[in-house]
Image (cartoon, coloured by chain):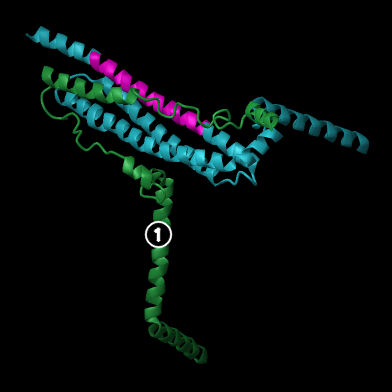
Amino acid sequence: MHVRLIAFITVVALIVSGSTLFARTARGEDQPNVITDSQIAMIKTHCTDLQASLNRLHQSDTLLRFNRGELYRTISDKLMVPLNQRIASNQLDGSTLVQITANYNTSYQTFFDSYKVYEVSLSAALSTDCVRQPTTFYDQVADARAKRIALHTASVRLVELAGQYKKSFGDFRKKADVTTEATR
Amino acid sequence: MNEHESTSKSRSNMLTFFDHHRFLFLVFGSIIIAIFLVFVALSLYVSSGTSQLDLSRPGYQAIREQVHEDTSFNGFDANGALDKNALNRFQSLYDAKLKEAESFDAYGNDVLSPESLQIDKSSSENAQTAQ
């Protein structure tokens, strides 16, 4: 009886652990950034250069974030929103433009948050001692890279929406011109 | 009766102790409140993302000098009639800013890739072969 019970528990445990392992592998969790011994040696040798490169990137990305943030906010606060208000105060239909502005502001928040997490990740990579912890450093850089790609996507989305607004403004303008002509 | 007397005595002793050290209590109380408020302020500073954009931090001297805030750009006026002139003005302002945004692919270069940092497998193998 006991032997059967032990065999049953063993089979259940094997099934559970096997399925968990399969699920993790399917999600890609068991596929970390594989780093070779020669890469570890390379990181250790060029640690100072790598840290200097990351430091320069950190500084230039901060400046870029400052300038881009200002530009993206200017487009919304000083151009899109005032035009939407003016359209509304002239009792015209600017619903498409308002919708794009709302999407733009949501995307700006995504851009803002993406930069925040990217900066934290890059700072973590910068503070990692690449001579003592080359593997951790490699993983931190990989993480910062993934977050920088997400930041780029958010930036591209903002420019796309700004382009969409221009197109919708063109359509609105055509309609407004037609209305003015018809009134005459 | 005796118990009551001793309780009132200890209470008066405590009051006397508080009265005697009023100034110390005031100083330490102020310090504790100040530390708490600084902790709250720093938590907000970090969690809101302001810390990441704060160019007044040490080590950002070079960046501060490169920042050019465009204060001359007033934008489009939210009030007034929406005639042809206003639409033309908006279009020229908007086109200029959009062109500026499209002129540069921000964060588009993959500078953190192992290849760019020269820590990829082929670079390290080549370096080992050279040695």
In the image: residue A37, left or right of residue A12: left
Figure label count:
1
Is residue A65 a member of the stretch shown in magenta?
A: no
Nearer to us in this view, A177 or B50: B50
- Visible residue check, residue A12: yes
User: Residue at 24% across / 17% down in the picture?
Assistant: A169
Q: Compared with residue B91, is residue B45 higher up or lower down, i.e. above or below?
A: below
Above or below: residue B15 compared with residue A64 = below
Residue positioned 30% across, 25% down in the render: B100
Point out the stretch of residues depicted in magenta.
A146-170
Dot 1, crowdedness within 10 Å: few (<14), some or many (≥20)? few
Task: Report helix, strand or loop for mark 1.
Answer: helix
Using the image as rendered, state which of residue A77 and residue A15 is in the foreground.
A77
Task: Give the residue at mark 1.
Answer: B38
User: Which quadrant of the view contains residue B130?
Assistant: top right
- Where is residue B76 shown, x and y percent of the image? 18, 28
Report the residue at 57% width, 39% height from top.
A140
Closest to the observer, A26 or B97: B97
Q: Main secondary structure of the magenta part?
A: helix
Chain identity of mark 1: B
* Kind of residue indicated by mark 1: Val
**Residue lying furthest bottom:** B2
Q: Describe residue A152's horizontal placement relative to residue B123 as left or right.
A: left
Camera sees residue B54:
no
Q: Colour of chain B?
A: green
Which quadrant would the C terminus of chain B be assigned to in this image? top right
Quarter location, residue B118: top right
Q: Using the image as rendered, state which of residue A35 and residue A73 is in the foreground.
A: A35
Which chain is the one coloured cyan? A
Q: Position of residue A95 (x, y in %)?
A: 26, 21
Horizontal side of A14 relative to B89 (left or right) equals: right
